[in-house]
Each structure stands twice: as C-alpha cells, then as structure tokens.
Image: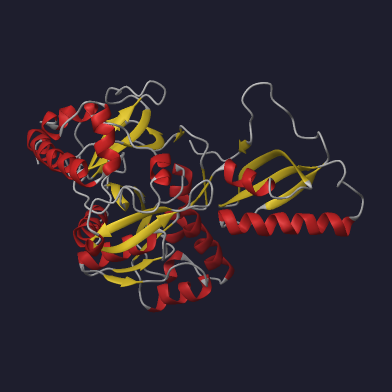
Amino acid sequence: MSRDEMHQLQSNRLRRLVSLVYHNVPFYRAKMQQLDLLPDDIRSIDDIVKLPFTTKQDLRDNYPFGLRAAAPADVIRVHASTGTTGSPTIVPYTRRDLSVWSEVVSRSLTAYGVTRDDVFSVSYGYGLFTGGLGAHYGVENLGATVIPASTGNTEKHLRLIHDLKITGIACTPSYALYLAETMAKLGMTKDDIYLRVGAFGAEPWTENMRHEIEERLGLKAYNIYGLSEIMGPGVSYECEGQNGSHINEDHFYPEIINPDTLQPQPVGTQGELVFTTLTKEGMPLLRYRTKDLCALQPGSCPCGRTSVRMGRIMGRSDDMLIIRGINVFPSQVESVILTMPELEPQYMLVVDRQGNLDTLQVQVEVRRDYFSDDMGRMLQMKKQLGERLKNVISINADIRLMEPNSIQRSEGKSKHVIDKRKLE
C-alpha cells in the first residue's frame, strides 16, 4: 500500500473510531468535551494531535469496564495485565478484535517465513497474559500446526520439539536460552532438532542474545512486539532484514512524543511511543502512552513493505521494569514492604542477568527494634516478605534484609532501582 493510500485508510478509520468512543465511552466523551471537540472536528489522521491522551492510570481509574465501547453481549474474551497496586487492567475483545489480532500475528509469522507446512510451538504463558493465546491463534490463522506447549516441563518440551519435528517456536528470548542450556545438559545439539524460526518478545533483549539464540538453537530469531492494552503480540514485527519492526499501522497508528512536553517528535527522533487503536471495538484507545522509548525509522525497507518501522525499545519514561516477561513496578514492592511493620520503607531493587535469565534482588532495611542476631527470626521475616512479593509480582526475588540506615539515601528523587543488565 502506498503512503497516500495508507493515509486515507487511517483517516477513514480514525473518523469512525472517534465517533464510536464519543457516543459509547463516557470517559472519552467527557475528555473531548473538555477540549471543545466534536467527532466532526476530526477529518483526517493529521487531526489526531487534537485528541486527548490515554494513560495506564486512566485504565485503572475506569476498572473494570469503564472504557468498554462494545455491548457486553459482544465481548467474547477478556484478557488482563497486572498493575502497580495488584489490580489488573481489564481488556475486553469482540469477535472482530480477535480476528484482527489473529491477522496481525499471522502477518508477523509470514514475515519470518512461516508457512502452512510449519509446526509451531507456542511457549508463552497461556491465560490472562496475552502472549500464549495471541500467538496461538495467529499460527492457526496462518494454517500452520500449533503446539500449545506453554511454559514449564522443559525436558518434555524438548522431547516434543524433537519427536514432532517442530520447526518454529514463540517464547521469551530468555526462555529460548534456557531451552538451549537444557539441551546441552541432555546431550542434545541443534543438529538433533528441526527449529528454524523463532518469534521472541515480552521482554527486552539484545543483539548478543539474538546471536546466541541463533547459534545454539540453529534458527533465525525475530522480534515481535505488543502490549495487552493495545492488542497483544503482533503490534509490530521484524522482517527478514531485522532492521526495525514493521508496525501494523492500518490497525495501530503510531506517534512519537516528547514525554515531558507531550509534543509530537519528528520521524527519526527518540521519544515516547503512543498508539491509537484504529479498528478495535471492545476497548479502543485514543493516543495511549506506552511509556516505551524508541524512534520511528524513516525510509523504505528492502523487504518491500511500506509500513513504518519502530526501532529497538531503548528504555521507559516511567519506572516499570520488565523481568522475565513480567511487568514489575517499584511501587508494587513498596506496597508489600509497607504491610510488614518490621521493615523500613527504605529499599533497593537490583536487576541483573545471570547467565541468560533475569534476576531480581530486593534489599530492604529492617527497623532497629526488629533487627537482631536471632537467625530463625530473621529467616522467618525473609520468607514472609518473599512469599508476599511472589503473590503480587509473580516472581521469586532474592530477599536481602539490611541493617538500619545501610541503604544510601538521596536528597533528590529517591532511587530504588539498579538495573545491571546490558540492553544496548
């Protein structure tokens, strides 16, 4: 599709979207009225800058279904993602939403060279997390054979990869490396399996990780990007050129803004990525601030696709961490610490990568009245904090109980995170 044709398609879809949310979502109607905007004021995609932004907090404030635009009877699936307070972000999907989702994931797989002849293992988690079912239906829609392996029982998974002659896999890059490590322990090599394509996402990864995965598993490793609020995996994808990820911009319109001024940034300039869901019915979003920092890449792609590309995610404009595919906020950890009277609200999160897996260490000060040489008492406190954290962030953290006043204070903005991972 030419850029002029894409512009026209996006304009038509934006006009329909604005009318839909104005008449069906009180939150957006109120926002537009505050800006003295009517649906007829939006004539083309160029007018998108007139529309209000949407934030993660807006989704939380409208929990569970305040941003739903479709009738309840038209919602046939609901996914959810975690939030800073433990309350999930609820995302409803209509039948057409699921059809679009399947289509954009199929586009991604096609760009990787997947065909109906492939056997594809989906090793993202199934359930409320969008990764598993998103990839699953994309593989089925393409006509390839899907193996819903999910996560866990890696040795059994490797046997299936071998015995079923599985040629493709969708999972986090860290799990792909864990798979390679398990293969080595079992005396297997890439010559014993048939994998040739991998769709990896849900966490940051480096070019070095890509090369290691490709070398150890004998496949071509591609990035797939998405977020549950917008749709799930399939918002963008790499082609065989592996030079940026093509955005499915007929469904998800991208902008780059300055996160401080909220003003649009020129193509090629790094800023915060913003998406508008041009065709979503269940919970359409206007100008959703992803908090992901990247740049849109100018120019055509050698693969022949004309869709705009986004560069690698270089960080975030908020304090969210992505650890083993899980979104973790320091405020989540803080909320758990505050439930224990033995602990001071002085803590530090140390994120690292040991081998090929992300690790999280939580350092927290014990109040002077509770700090003692009684090892049994301290171990019980450590165990209690670890269990409570696991219930909130779904990750086993290495708990370090610290002496009073041992964590460095800051006169300015408190620093609670040390990220030692090398993600350049």
**Above or below, comparing residue 29 to residue 130 in the picture:** above
Nearest the camera: 423 or 366?
366
**Above or below, comparing residue 185 to residue 349 in the picture:** below
Locate the N terminus by quadrant: top left
- The image shows residue 30 at horizontal and vertical percentages of 27, 35
Residue 245 in view of the camera: no
Location of residue 39 (image quadrant): top left
**How many badges with numbers are in the image?**
0
Residue located farthest toward the right when viewing the structure as drawn = 373
Nearest the camera: 33 or 263?
33
Left or right: where 301 falls relative to 166:
left
- The image shows residue 87 at horizontal and vertical percentages of 49, 52
Left or right: where 423 falls relative to 360:
left
Left or right: where 139 falls relative to 410:
left
Q: What residue is at 62 percent from the left and 46 percent from the top?
A: 335
Question: How is the structure coloured here?
Answer: secondary structure
Location of residue 417 (image quadrant): top right
**Above or below, comparing residue 111 to residue 119 in the picture:** above
Q: What residue is at 28 percent from the left and 31 percent from the top?
A: 52
Residue 149 in view of the camera: yes
- The image shows residue 37 at horizontal and vertical percentages of 19, 28
- The image shows residue 300 at horizontal and vertical percentages of 19, 34
Q: What residue is at 20 percent from the left and 60 percent from the top?
A: 99
